Image (cartoon, rainbow, N blue to C red):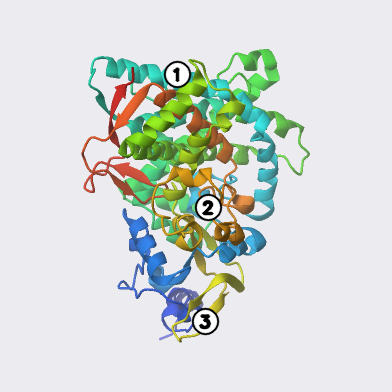
Amino acid sequence: MTVSLPVLGAIAILLFGLWHFLQDYFLSSPLDNLPGPASTSLLQGHIHEIFARRGWKFLKDLSERYGPVTRVRGLLGARMLIVYDPKAMHSLLIKDADSYPKCSAPFDEFKLFLGPSVLTTDGGQHRRQRKQLNAVFSAAHLRNMTHLFYDIAHRVRKALEHRTASAPGGDVVDVNGWMARTTLEMLGQATLGYSFDNFVDDSTDAFGESLKGFFPTYARIALVGFIIPPLSYFLPQRVCRAILRAIPHADIRKMMHISNTMAQRSLEIINEKKMALLKGDDVMREKVGEGKDLMSILLKANMLASEADRLSDEELIAQMSTFILAGMDTTANSLTRILHVLAEHPAEQEKLRAEVSEARHGNDIAYEALEKLPYLDAVCRETLRLYSPVNVIGRTSAKDMTLPLLTPVVGKDGSMVSEVAVPEGTWIMANIQASNCNRALWGEDAYEWKPERWLKPFPASLEDARIPGVYSHLLSFSGGSRSCIGFKFSQLEMKILLSILLSTFKFETTGRTVTWNTSGVSYPTMGEDSDKPELLLKVTKVA
């Protein structure tokens, strides 16, 4: 029987694909000498444990059992590294960052869903976008956001006052829901010049609903993130999107609907802003954000930029959704965590209430004064240290690399390993939580919530380690050229809202179990059996 050339070609491609995905089971690797757990799943490796709802517990166990570098298995046996060694992370995020892109493939699932934004691009395109956006997120522009944030914070305060007025003994409130609504409105007005919420009813528009649904939906289809990059070598984005739309899976179809809605509304808002800009500053001042929102500033700067630096409409559209997505859940859930921790520590809550109430004197605290409140700053930093909203940062080695270690580990052969030979294509996860709670650097009480640690000198070991984070020896906002561009924006949001809420309300636990879950961003539920993001606290107006 004669076999045609096309059939032979198809068989060759199939065999090559099978070898590409299964070779890790048959070939040795320098990573094999590193400590790590055995995998019980041929198909998933440790992916299920890492990205399970309680994945943060698995990651904590790995760090405590195996140390600052651990070898684990990915899909179909692929070798992966999980690290929290400071020197290794400095190499990943700063020194050799170009050799460790977020994705070495043409595109990943986030670029497919969001477009070419500062979150999803690498190399020269990322540097060009970052150059434009650094000016937008300057301290001067941030200071202009203060009155917008206070206005929204007071609207939230009034809404909660109205709710608790009929319950003198306190009302049980889903603070996570309120923090999500609040940060979405702050981000909407300050970054897009767009209002999502009037805080009178519970309705938001389709854009707001899509933004809120992105990460919860993504958490249910996370395995797509391991399928899209390999496909991107053979299929263009439009074909991948068409395939995903055709898959009869409710959550995948929901994600594609969310992606389409965000892109369409972003395009409409950008076109509206361009028209307003052409009509002059008087028209802009009548809009939400008064023309001082970050997108209006970016559009003005983009019009004046050189051809080489100018962002395309596709890039501008992608920035819009990214601004909101990168800041909404992270800030909202961090605020929720702070209120939850303060409810569990009433003495510390009272101490913080006294500080912000004294600083307010019945008025809003000025930008500079707010930044200098020591205990408010300590509470924010300590909560972000112990409970980073994002657990891991992923990178891929674009070529064979050597990863240095500050603290050597014992290899399986008994030798001391002070550097790791990393083959091209290895996926590496920086374990943010383990770095932030490294007992060797922070002390034996590293897993305890102690704001006062920020009011005294740091341990010498921590100073010497040179953690590559952009914020207070922490990786909560990442580090290097890909660090969170809006971390000061997020800090201002949190401090303004906490100054208003804590001077008005007392927060107490309800006695019900609260579970914190792993996803793209950590989120709370009332108990392990619930899938609904929420955190109920008793809220009472203080005298």
Element class at badge 2: loop
Element class at badge 3: strand
- The residue beneath circle 3 is 416
Question: Mark 1 Cα within 10 Å, few/some/many (few <14, many 20+)?
Answer: some
Of mark 1 and mark 3, the one earlier in the sequence is 1
The single residue placed furthest to the front in the displayed view is 456
Query: Residue 483, relative to residue 371: is it above or below?
Result: below
Question: Mark 2 Cα within 10 Å, few/some/many (few <14, many 20+)?
Answer: many
Query: Residue 191, relative to residue 60: is it above or below?
Result: above
Tell me where residue 507 appears, x and y as whole percent.
32, 30
- The residue beneath circle 1 is 154
Q: Quadrant of residue 215?
A: top left
Disc 2 versus disc 1: distance between alpha carbons?
Answer: 32 Å
Give the residue drawn at x 35%, y 40%. 341
Disc 2 versus disc 3: distance between alpha carbons?
Answer: 27 Å
Q: Quadrant of the C terminus?
A: top left
Of mark 2 and mark 1, the one earlier in the sequence is 1
Instruction: Depth check: give the residue in front, 304 or 142.
Output: 142
Instruction: Depth check: give the residue in front, 369 or 41.
Output: 369
- The residue beneath circle 2 is 475
Tell me where residue 447 appears, x and y as whole percent.
39, 54
Tell me where residue 136 appears, x and y as whole percent.
66, 34
Give the residue drawn at x 48%, y 57%. 442
Query: Which amino acid, by three-letter code, is at mark 3?
Result: Met
Query: Which amino acid, by three-letter code, is at mark 2?
Result: Leu
Q: Is residue 246 left or right of residue 278?
A: left
The answer to whether one can see residue 72 in this image is no
Q: Decide: marks 2, 1 in contact (CB < 8 A)?
A: no
Query: Which amino acid, by three-letter code, is at mark 1?
Result: His
Tell me where residue 3 appears, x and y as whole percent.
45, 82
